[in-house]
Image (cartoon, rainbow, N blue to C red):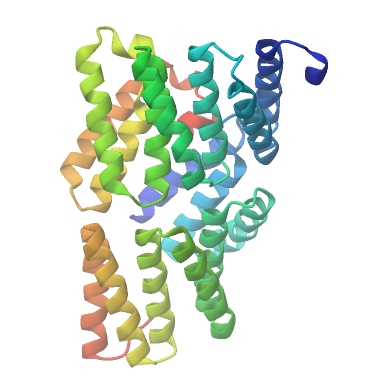
Amino acid sequence: MAQGEFALVRQNLEVALGKSAQWVGEHDLYALLADAAAQQRDEAALRQYAPLAEAAAGRYRHLLYQAIAHRTWGVAKRLAHEYTEAEARLNQALELFQKLDTHWQIGRTLFEMGELAASRADTPAAHAHFQHALAMFEDMQAVPDAARARAMLEGLNEGPVDD
Amino acid sequence: MAEQLDGLAELSAALGALSSVYGARGLFREREQVALRRLRLSQDSRFDDVRERVNILHQAGAALAYVGEYTAAMPHLLEAERLGGQIQAVDQQIAALRYQSECWYFLDRWDRVLEIEEKWRALQKRYPHFFERVGAMCFQVSLSASIHARRGEFERARLLREESFALMVAAEPPEAWGRDNHY
């Protein structure tokens, strides 16, 4: 998702927040906003939406959105160089996604684990996570995500990865 | 108040109204419990309104789906689709298919979502004035668009996105859009 597209997603979802709820709740909107912020590595949006997404998902005991909130926090903590907290959050996310058997989400979480390992300069772990993510994406025929995972693997082979 | 009503149909209708109120207030877990209670009521042998039974089944599935209980929702939605087909109620078949596709989408079962698209497009060919009977299918088209985008099939995704938007605008002018439209 390009920056302009994220702005459009955010604009639409923030308008939706002001409308009455029947079949789309705040938990739906906050999960999407937080997830989009994580994909964009937008620290300000992460600070704004990760707590709201987590609170709403918890209120409804919505496992998928709880997992997305954990992953969002994992990205936020990695960007803040709080790697231990990031790892704990990503592990929690992965555990929930595995329970739900949501393969694309598992792949995306493994990709974030690869990013975290690369930030810690743990190349073998990063390689293993990206490789595992790539297998999940290929299985899903998620071509753009598979290309991202391949690019990260090639980057690892060439040298250190920047944030 | 609903519990003081004797007739199953009246009690079911009262629970349906309560479910709507919970939905409007964003009380989705409470709505789930009411929907499941209504479902149990509809399983009583004296409950003989099949059309209403299908409606209750799909509402139970939808209520479960909205709190993320996608796998639990699916048997009710499949049964709603089957019964809807049996009584040739295309609107109810489609209502069940809508929520099935949403559940499969959130469970990352993209092939299943696209299979459901094939099903409803086949029904569209069979029934004249399809959208007038079943309502706009913009959300389902947008789910398919999203899947094609995730697969890197961007031209197909673009066409579906435009179809979805056109359906939504045709159904309601943008100034009247609610949360669902922006979502």
Looking at the image, residue B107 lies above or below residue B25: below
Residue A80 in view here: no
Looking at the image, residue B36 lies above or below residue A65: above
Q: Residue A86's x, y, as percent?
A: 54, 78
Q: Quadrant of residue B37?
A: top right
Q: Quadrant of residue A49?
A: bottom right
Q: Nearer the viewer, residue B37 or A104?
A: B37
Tell me the quarter of the image containing the C terminus of chain A: bottom left
Q: Residue at x 67, y 36 (%)?
A: B33
Q: Left or right: A61 with respect to A114?
A: right
Looking at the image, residue A82 lies above or below residue B76: below
Q: Residue at x 51, y 78 (%)?
A: A78
Tell me the quarter of the image containing the N terminus of chain A: bottom left
Q: Left or right: B93 with respect to A77?
A: left
Q: Residue at x 65, y 11 (%)?
A: B9
Q: Residue at x 25, y 48 (%)?
A: B149
Q: Residue B122's x, y, as percent?
A: 21, 22
The total number of labels drawn is: 0
Which residue ends up furthest to the front in the rendered image? B45
Residue B163 in view here: yes
Q: Residue B146's x, y, as percent?
A: 31, 44
Q: Nearer the viewer, residue B104 or A38?
A: B104
Looking at the image, residue B80 lies above or below residue B130: below
Which residue ends up furthest to the top in the rendered image? B128
Q: Left or right: B76 with respect to A143?
A: right
Q: Quadrant of residue A63?
A: bottom right
Q: Residue A132's x, y, as percent?
A: 30, 76
